[in-house]
Structures are given as structure tokens and as C-alpha cells.
């Protein structure tokens, strides 16, 4: 049976009202959810801030400020030449150190030339590996 | 009268004993200076042993080696001994290397030489060459601290006796005007007017055929692969290590004697000559060092300022 024009208009108007209602409901729902999420985020942020503050407070209590560690006062020598005999005679020590001590080259004395001896007057000192 | 004759004709005194794992021969002229000199020598050598020995568990050197990589407070005497060793390494570009502690242990030299079995069947260890230039990383504080490079161990055997000989004769000379000569296992230091005669042989057990020369001043040292030898797992070992290989040297020369303005300088030259092998004569000549070398066949070679022996009258 063919529908009348009036009936079709009523149906279309109902659909429009229904669609509008659903849209409005969706908008309201979305707004509510967004609001709740924002509240939750703010709440979590508050909790985090409180937690960090509490932790910082606890760390401050557990680790009191330490006295500064004294720096080493030793002069670290990287290259130093010590003449063997200087230990007993208080001789010269030269070298370049971290303190910026200028180095000074020591000119060694020439190696002595031994003299042949046929009949030593004193008992000779032995130079032999042992 | 020349100073040489003055020292020679004056009555001299001699004392011998053992220290630092080797023989000590101390002579003075006049003889009256001997006992005070001996007291000084005994005290100083005990101090050197206490601080510098690789075989005493209570020595400063052992403590520093066990703490390699960090600073260790030590007797300033050890700092000076290490300084002398570093100086020797610098003058020889590392041929005389103080960081051979691990290499020596690897070849079996891990205790006093008198305690090493002459013929051990222990398996040979893998050679441990020194890290090139590790000696440059040795840190020293003259007030009493050293730092051994991480992974290294110091051994002062190559320079310690010679340095100690210089130390002792200098200390004696500071107390007396006598002429004094000290031989520490063949490393000789002499000071005072006139110098002293020296008898050179390869080993102390073989005095026959000694070549006698007069040392006017300074030092004279003999290094030899003929001494401090042992067998390990059928292989002959000795104490002179080539730092480039970590193995005992096996070059042309078995014994080298050299002079120097100090005993340390002489010993540095004689040890370097053994390590250098074929290049030794050129190296010594370039540095104008009188030296007497004995090759593995027993033939003697002298550099230009070492005199030919004078025949006995």
C-alpha cells in the first residue's frame, strides 16, 4: 500500500529528532569523559608531585650534606731524573713535574777509561757476575 | 807521587759478606777506614733490601707491585731506586726496563736465586714481554709514594745493585776522606783519590784468567748470562730478559763489562749491550763507553777506549 506524503514527513521528522538527540547525547558524553580524564590527570600529577616531594625530603634526611673531599696535595711527577749518587750526597735532582718545574739536562761525566795493570798494589775488587 | 800510587801504596783493608742476594766486597785505603765504612754499607744495604727486594713479602716494592694501578706510600729510598731505574730505561730507550717483574716470574725467577732449583722440571711458562713504554707510566712522588702501571710489576734487578753501590760509596765518602771501592755482585763503584784495581771475570767462581785494570773513578759493571742460570723444563734460562720478547736474551754476547761516571751508568751500558746483541759495539762506540765484551764462544772484543791487557812481568 502506498504511503501518504504526510506519513513520510512525520517519519522524516522523527528521524531528524532522533539523530539530533543522539548527537547531543554523544557530545554531552564526550564532554563528561574529557572532564573526568582531566580530573584524573590532575589528580595523578598531584600525587606524583607529592611523592617526589616526600622522596626528596627523605633523601635529605638520609644523606646529610658531606664535607668537601680534600684534593690530593701531592705533586705528581711524570718524568724525573734522579742521579744515583745524589741520595747520599744531597746532589741535584732534576726533572719536569706537574707543578711546572722546568727540566734541566744534566751532562754526564765521560765514562772513565780503565788503565791496564800488570801487578796491582792493592787487592783488586772483583767484577764478576754472580 | 801520583794519586794512583798514593792510594795503591797506602795499606788497605777489605771486608766481604753477602747482601742483596749476592757478594759484597768492600775495600778502603787506609785500612783504618774500613770498619766505619762497613757499618755504613751494612746499614744502607739492609735499607735497600727492605725497601727494594722483589723477594721479601714485607718490602715496599712488593706492596707497590701488588697495588699496581694505584698510589702506594713507600720509603723515599725506593722512590730514588725507581728513579734510577727509569733513568736507565730512558737512556737506553727501554732496553734496560724496570717493568719486567712478570716476565721474570714467567721464566722461573720468582724467588731468591739461591732458592731456585738449578734443574727444575716445572713446565715453562708463556713468556710475558713488557708492555712497550710501560716504564714511562711509572709515577713517583719523591716524598714517598709510587704508582706502578696497571698490569705491570717492577723489578729493580737490572739497576738496583749498581745504584746501591753508588749510594754506599757516596755515603762513605761523605763521612771519610778515604779511597773506597765497593763491588756488589760485580757492580763496582769507586771514589776517593787514586781509584782502585779491578779484576774482571765472567763469574765469581772463575777467578782464573782475570783481566785486571785500574779504575780511576766512577763505576764499572759486568753483566753476564753465565751467572744466575737455571734449567726449566729442559730449557736453560737466565736473568737477563729482553723486554721486547719477555725471554732471556740469546744474542751474540754472554758477558759485557763497561765503565761509567757512576756504577749505575756502567751497569746500564753493560746490560744494554747484552740485550742489543749484534748492535752493541756500535751503540757503545757512539756513546764513547769503554767496554769489554765476551761472545758466546769466549772471544773477547774491546771497544776503542778499553785497553789491551798488559802482560804480567
Image (cartoon, rainbow, N blue to C red):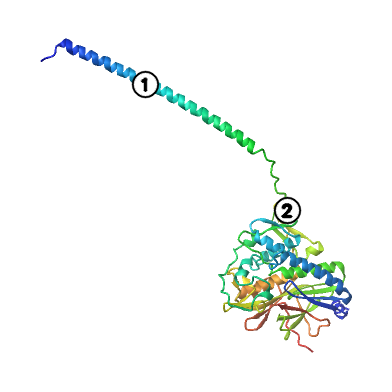
Chain identifier of the residue bearing label 2 in the image: A
Q: Is residue A113 left or right of residue A12?
A: right
Secondary structure beneath dot 1 equals helix
Residue B124 circle label: none
The earlier-in-sequence mark between 1 and 2 is: 1
State whether discs 1 and 2 lie on one chain.
Answer: yes
Which residue position is annotated with label 1? A29
Residue B72, x across and y down, in percent: 69, 57
Residue B306: name its quadrant.
bottom right
Mark 2 Cα-neighbour bin, 10 Å: few <14, some 14–19, many ≥20: few
Residue indicated by mark 2: A101
Q: Nearer the viewer, residue B6 or B274?
A: B274
In percent of width and height, residue B209 lies at: 72, 86
Residue B43, position in %: x, y? 81, 68
Indicate the secondary structure of the residue bearing disc 2.
loop
- The total number of labels drawn is 2
Above or below residue B308? Residue B132 is above
Amino acid at each position: 500500500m502506498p504511503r501518504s506524503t504526510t506519513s513520510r514527513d512525520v517519519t522524516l521528522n522523527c528521524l531528524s529528532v532522533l539523530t539530533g538527540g543522539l548527537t547531543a547525547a554523544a557530545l554531552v558524553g564526550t564532554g563528561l569523559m574529557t572532564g573526568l580524564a582531566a580530573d584524573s590527570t590532575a589528580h595523578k600529577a598531584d600525587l606524583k608531585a607529592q611523592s617526589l616531594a616526600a622522596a626528596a625530603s627523605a633523601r635529605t634526611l638520609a644523606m646529610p650534606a658531606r664535607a668537601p673531599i680534600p684534593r690530593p696535595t701531592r705533586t705528581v711527577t711524570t718524568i724525573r731524573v734522579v742521579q744515583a749518587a745524589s741520595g747520599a750526597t744531597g746532589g741535584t735532582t732534576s726533572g719536569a713535574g706537574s707543578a711546572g718545574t722546568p727540566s734541566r739536562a744534566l751532562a754526564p761525566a765521560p765514562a772513565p777509561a780503565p788503565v791496564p795493570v800488570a801487578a796491582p798494589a792493592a787487592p783488586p775488587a772483583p767484577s764478576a757476575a754472580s | 807521587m801520583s794519586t794512583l800510587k798514593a792510594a795503591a801504596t797506602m795499606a788497605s783493608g777489605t771486608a766481604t759478606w753477602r747482601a742483596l742476594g749476592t757478594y759484597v766486597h768492600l775495600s778502603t785505603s787506609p785500612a783504618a777506614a774500613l770498619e766505619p765504612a762497613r757499618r755504613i754499607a751494612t746499614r744502607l744495604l739492609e735499607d735497600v733490601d727492605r725497601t727494594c727486594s722483589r723477594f721479601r713479602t714485607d718490602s715496599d716494592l712488593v706492596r707497590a707491585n701488588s697495588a699496581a694501578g694505584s698510589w702506594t706510600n713507600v720509603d723515599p729510598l725506593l722512590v730514588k731506586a725507581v728513579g734510577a731505574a727509569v733513568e736507565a730505561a730512558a737512556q737506553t730507550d727501554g732496553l734496560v726496563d724496570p717493568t719486567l717483574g712478570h716476565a721474570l716470574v714467567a721464566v722461573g725467577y720468582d724467588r731468591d736465586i739461591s732458592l731456585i732449583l738449578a734443574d727444575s722440571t716445572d713446565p715453562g711458562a708463556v713468556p710475558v714481554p713488557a708492555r712497550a713504554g710501560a716504564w714511562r707510566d711509572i709515577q713517583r712522588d719523591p716524598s714517598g709514594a709510587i704508582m706502578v702501571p696497571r698490569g705491570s710489576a717492577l723489578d729493580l734487578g737490572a739497576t738496583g745493585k749498581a745504584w746501591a753501590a753508588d749510594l754506599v760509596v757516596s755515603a762513605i765518602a761523605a763521612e771519610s776522606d778515604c779511597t773506597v771501592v765497593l763491588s756488589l755482585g760485580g757492580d763496582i763503584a769507586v771514589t776517593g783519590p787514586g781509584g782502585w784495581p779491578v779484576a774482571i771475570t765472567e763469574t765469581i767462581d772463575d777467578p782464573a784468567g782475570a783481566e785486571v785494570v785500574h779504575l780511576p773513578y766512577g763505576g764499572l759493571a759486568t753483566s753476564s748470562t753465565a751467572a744466575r742460570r737455571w734449567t726449566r723444563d729442559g730449557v736453560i734460562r737466565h736473568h737477563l730478559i729482553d723486554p721486547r720478547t719477555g725471554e732471556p736474551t740469546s744474542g751474540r754476547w754472554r758477558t759485557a763489562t763497561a765503565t761509567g761516571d757512576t756504577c749505575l751508568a756502567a751497569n746500564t751500558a753493560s746490560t744494554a749491550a747484552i740485550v742489543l746483541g749484534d748492535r752493541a759495539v756500535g751503540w757503545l762506540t757512539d756513546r764513547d763507553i769503554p767496554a769489554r765484551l765476551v761472545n758466546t764462544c769466549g772471544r773477547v772484543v774491546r771497544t776503542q777506549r778499553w785497553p789491551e791487557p798488559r802482560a804480567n812481568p
